[in-house]
Image: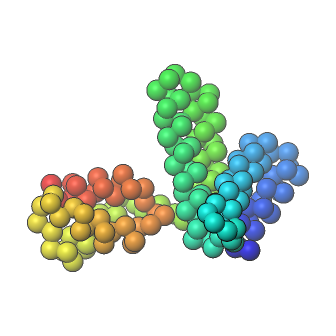
């Protein structure tokens, strides 16, 4: 079993003992998504830590998008709950890159590829994505690349 999945289960048990309903329900939903990912496809398999991180990243993104949608609909209390769930999930994700760190990675990728304009954005993104995987959202990366090339 992956260490991260084991940690999620242990933290779920601790949250249930502490009667922390929000944390327990969030971890339970997250573990359900991990299990769904394990049984998806032609045969069941155990996910690696990297694959569990991908599931966690996907779940955090869902929470951010739902919170934005609730804010736009004027449902602040539901947006707050989604943000709180997102913060709990974020505890298990690697630290996000700062704008300066992301800019430095993009700058070195632009130099490496020899990009001269927006037509080279795909080449730059191909170099940057593996370096920032899980540590920066795709939209943020694309915006940084666009500002550097534009």
Image spot of residue 47 (x, y percent): 65, 70
Residue at horizontal 84 percent and vertical 57 percent from the top:
13
Q: Quadrant of the N terminus?
A: bottom right
Q: Residue furthest top?
A: 74
Q: Residue furthest right?
A: 17
Q: Quadrant of the C terminus?
A: bottom left
Residue at horizontal 75 percent and vertical 68 percent from the top:
6
Residue 97 appears left or right of 144 = right
Image spot of residue 57 (x, y percent): 54, 57
Image spot of residue 4 (x, y percent): 68, 68
Seen from the viewer's position, the closer of residues 36 and 142 is 36
Question: Which quadrant of the structure image shows residue 46?
Answer: bottom right
Q: Residue furthest front?
A: 42
Question: Which quadrant of the structure image shows residue 126?
Answer: bottom left
| Vertical comparison of 73 with 138: above or below | above
Residue 126 appears left or right of 83 = left
Residue 103 appears left or right of 12 = left
Q: Residue furthest bottom?
A: 112
Image spot of residue 122 (x, y percent): 24, 63
Residue at horizontal 78 percent and vertical 61 percent from the top:
9
Seen from the viewer's position, the closer of residues 57 and 34 is 34
Q: How is the image coloured?
A: rainbow
Residue at horizontal 41 percent and vertical 67 percent from the top:
132
Question: Which quadrant of the structure image shows residue 51?
Answer: bottom right
Q: How many marks?
A: 0
Can the viewer see residue 93? Answer: no
Can the viewer see residue 149? Answer: yes
């Amino acid at each position: 079993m992956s260490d991260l999945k084991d940690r999620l289960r242990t933290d779920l048990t601790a949250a249930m003992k502490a009667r922390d309903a929000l944390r327990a329900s969030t971890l339970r939903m997250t573990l359900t998504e991990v299990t769904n990912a394990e049984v998806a496809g032609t045969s069941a398999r155990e996910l690696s830590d990297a694959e569990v991180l991908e599931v966690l990243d996907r779940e955090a993104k869902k929470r951010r998008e739902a919170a934005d949608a609730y804010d736009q609909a004027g449902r602040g209390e539901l947006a707050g709950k989604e943000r709180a769930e997102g913060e709990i999930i974020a505890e298990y994700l690697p630290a996000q890159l700062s704008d300066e760190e992301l800019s430095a990675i993009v700058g070195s990728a632009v130099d490496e590829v020899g990009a001269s304009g927006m037509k080279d954005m795909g080449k730059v993104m191909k170099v940057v994505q593996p370096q920032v995987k899980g540590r920066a959202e795709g939209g943020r990366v694309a915006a940084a690349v666009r500002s550097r090339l534009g």
